[in-house]
Image (cartoon, grey):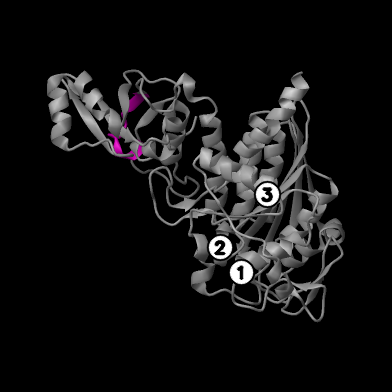
Amino acid sequence: MLEGLTARAMGALPLYAVRTDGLTAFLGDLPAAVASFLRATGFTARPGESALLPGEDGLAGAVVGIGQDDAPWAFGALPRSLPAGTAWRLAPGPQDHARATLGWALGAYRPRRHKSGGPSLAVLEVPAEAGTAVATAEAICAARDLINAPAADLGPAELADAVAALAARHGGTCEVVMGDSLDQGFPAVAAVGQGSPRAPRVAVLRWTGAEGGPLVALCGKGVCFDTGGLDLKSSAGMLRMKKDMGGAAVVLAAAEMIMRADLPVRLLVLVGAVENAVSGTAMRPMDVLRTRKGLKVEIGNTDAEGRLVLCDLLTFAAEQQPAMILDCATLTGAARVALGPDLPALFSNDDALAARLLAAGQAVHDPMWRLPLHDGYDSWLDSPFADLSNVSQKPMAGAVTAALFLRRFVPAEIPWAHLDLYAWNDSTRPGRPEGGEAHCARALHAMVEEFARPHATTTAG
């Protein structure tokens, strides 16, 4: 069981959830003295606001305000704001029990790999109505653990091991491609990782749900540390580059949720696990690299390595003729300048797929924002020495041109979506502690679940 959750707790106190428009009725149902006390505290039931309720023998319960949209974040601060060591149960009320449990669990997360101790947390008794919330929280927290791991602990080998372990837990298979096979099959991935003593590799996970179904391909950028290569990042720019494998962590979290739910799909999960290091064997600016598709790419900047990793993965995925390809990557600072840390940039060659993703993100409070694949900028990737450059020479629309680069490696007839995400919380907020974050994972799972539903109905019929 995740930290902050318990299957059953003796003496668990009631936790009441109240909407602003239901506060008057809630106060009317309380004993007069307790209602007067709550009024005196100034409690207004705004989302996330909480207050303790007194009883004859001490603490009788607590109340938390929730919004009209049932966002999980209203419950995210409670594991730390309620008295340490206390146990709680959700009282009947207007809250969605699954989202309340998810918010609590995500708020209770804290990195444990190299940090011990810390204050005790309040714990929540998991309600029967929580559904898959615990499984979702476990997948998100596992992704956070991967992103938060120091690069010294999580290199390409360890990331590939994480993919293999995920496959083993759910009856899938995992092949790890490296060495000469990588050079031949994924030459751009090999080129990105050739400057590091920690050898690059591609992990290929395959899984089939109980009912089979359409093939969904998930591709994740797994750059375990990014120095920028010979186009070296500044010290400030390099500081958080252990999170440059965040795209891989996100697709692993989404895959875990899909497999746990046994959705009627087949999964192909591809993780390009590399380190972009500086050495005498590192790729150089103006080198020309071979790709799996056969296109030759001139290196305009060695710090634009993520798209080189993804281009080979996208080509391999397309060869399997999937129903859709979804890729996730911490790809550009330009996306963060445009949309900030919380809104991943969505690019897609298929309006229906983009609409599904946007709707799923809104439904589960895991939003994204669509940006255009503007054809007018495609020529910005032209190179006089190769089929294309890995960067534009214009200092504008960096997220768009990165997505246009990736589009060159996806056949137009295959629905494809690219998510350029941050994978990090700069500061702690309810349910979202500082550190690694699996942006889009819940949205991807929700979209695939909705996509798979017609197939499940057809199969059952």
- State the SS at label 1: helix
Question: Which residue position holds label 2?
Answer: 335
Question: Which residue position holds label 3?
Answer: 351
User: In this picture, is 444 found above or below 395?
Assistant: above
Q: What residue type is labelled 2?
A: Ala
Q: How much space separates mark 2 and mark 3, taking CA atoms? A: 20 Å
User: In this picture, is 226 found above or below 101?
Assistant: below
Q: Where in the figure is residue 259, as x and y percent of width and height?
A: 67, 33
Q: Where in the figure is residue 408, as x and y percent of width and height?
A: 78, 62
Closer to the camera in the image, 149 or 308 = 308
Q: In which quarter of the image is the C terminus?
A: top right
| 134 left or right of 80 in image | right
Q: How much space separates mark 3 and mark 1, taking CA atoms? A: 22 Å
Residue 88 lies in the magenta-colored region = yes
Give the number of the mark in front: 3 or 1. 3
Residue 194 lies in the magenta-colored region = no
**Residue interval drawn in magenta:** 79-89
- State the SS at label 3: helix
Can residue 263 be seen by looking at this rendering?
no
Question: Which residue position holds label 1?
Answer: 398
Can residue 131 be seen by looking at this rendering?
yes
Crowding at mark 3 (Cα within 10 Å: few <14, some 14-19, many 20+) = few
Say whether marks 1 and 2 touch (CB < 8 Å): yes
User: In this picture, is 168 found above or below 30?
Assistant: below
